[in-house]
Amino acid sequence: MAETQLSRRDRATTSRSRMADVARLAGVSTATVSRALRQPDMVSPTVRSRIEDAIERLSYRRNLVAGALASARTMTVGVIIPSIINSFFAATVEALEEGLAGSGYQLMLGNTGYSAALEQQLVSSFLAWSPAAMVVTGRRHEAETVRGLLASHIPVFEMWELSDHPIDTIVGFSHRAVGALVVRHFAARGARRLGFIGAYMQHDYRTADRGAGFVEAALQAGFAAPLEACLEDRASAMGGARGLAELIARDTKVDAVFCSNDIIALGALFEAGRQGLRVPEQLKICGFGDLEFTGASAPALTTVRPPRREIGLKIAQLLRERLDGTAARGGSFDLGVALVPRGST
């Protein structure tokens, strides 16, 4: 079709495969395509398969803002996090919501369960609603997820990590730097034999990065390679207890243990008591997260405090500036972390 024949709506949608294109490729009517998307049981499996193949080939994405211009954006911000029950991410989402208060924008929340494949599905689903912006967790995504976010031409924020090459803008901190910070603290406290307990590391690579940063910094500082206990399940106090018991069984000289989060550190603290180990004289324990109970345990837990709320507030600030047209696209914002020394070290 010549440019002069394009309507305003057609010009706005040339970058997006239209339902008519899907219908033409599948050899059906647009009404059948619409029915297959909305009521798949009303379409025969054979026809539905042809439509699904056409959708995949054309990378078609439904625009659920029916009747509006294709360039229209809703007043929603898609936010995708790995765990809706994890207090780290809950605090960030809460702060993001507070930072957007009064702007008219509302959050649309998705939970991946640490699955990159589910993140891809959620991103595709959220983009179909034409959000004003997207916020995703981490820097590692499926290739299709990245392509979809780039093709959306909306502000995209990655969070809870850092990258030299973000999709658009990233706000967070270095997890490897967390591990190095703990090594320096243990060294200053006179530790000699180090250990690390991490959970769910095959799914949560940020935990794995903290462990890798800890091991790397320990070797650079002249320590022997730290012993590692890798728990397959999600973080729990029971897992932390099992992890410490495993480390001590392998080497009774372990005198300083970094736990990938505070829940694990609490379990390690309980296990140290059961084994008759004095904390911090015989065993030093450090966690990550600075959860509320860390200051109330006995002894109080040393931990690393991530910028949970600061990440949400910073993204809200940058997002409002972007949507107002007062800020440029892109950038990496390192909000750092803080070590909180307490009685366990």
Image: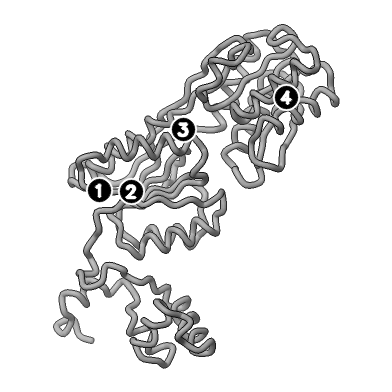
Q: Earlier in the sequence, mark 4 or mark 2?
A: 2
Q: Earlier in the sequence, mark 3 or mark 4?
A: 3
Q: Quadrant of residue 328?
A: top left
Q: CA distance from mark 3 to mark 4?
A: 23 Å
Q: Residue at x 68, y 28 (%)?
A: 215
Q: Position of residue 169 (x, y in %)?
A: 36, 44
Kindly report which numbered mark, 2 or 3, lies closer to the viewer in this rendering: 2
Q: Residue at x 35, y 72 (%)?
A: 62
Q: Can you tell which mark lies on residue 173?
A: 3
Residue of label 1: 105
Q: Earlier in the sequence, mark 4 or mark 1?
A: 1
Between 168 and 203, the residue placed more toward the observer is 203
Q: CA distance from mark 4 to mark 1?
A: 45 Å
Q: Position of residue 344 (x, y in %)?
A: 63, 13
Q: Earlier in the sequence, mark 1 or mark 3?
A: 1
Q: Quadrant of residue 207?
A: top right
Question: Which quarter of the image is occupied by the C terminus?
Answer: top right
| Contact? badges 1 and 2 (CB < 8 Å) | yes
Q: CA distance from mark 1 to mark 3?
A: 26 Å
Horizontally, residue 326 falls left or right of residue 203, namely: left
Q: Residues within 10 Å of mark 4 (few under 14, many from 20)?
A: many
Kindly report which numbered mark, 4 or 1, lies closer to the viewer in this rendering: 1
Q: Residue at x 39, y 74 (%)?
A: 60
Residue of label 4: 195
What amino acid type should be assigned to the residue bearing mark 4? Answer: Gly
Residue of label 2: 107
What amino acid type should be assigned to the residue bearing mark 3? Answer: Phe
Q: Is residue 81 above or below residue 249?
A: below
Between 47 and 273, the residue placed more toward the observer is 273
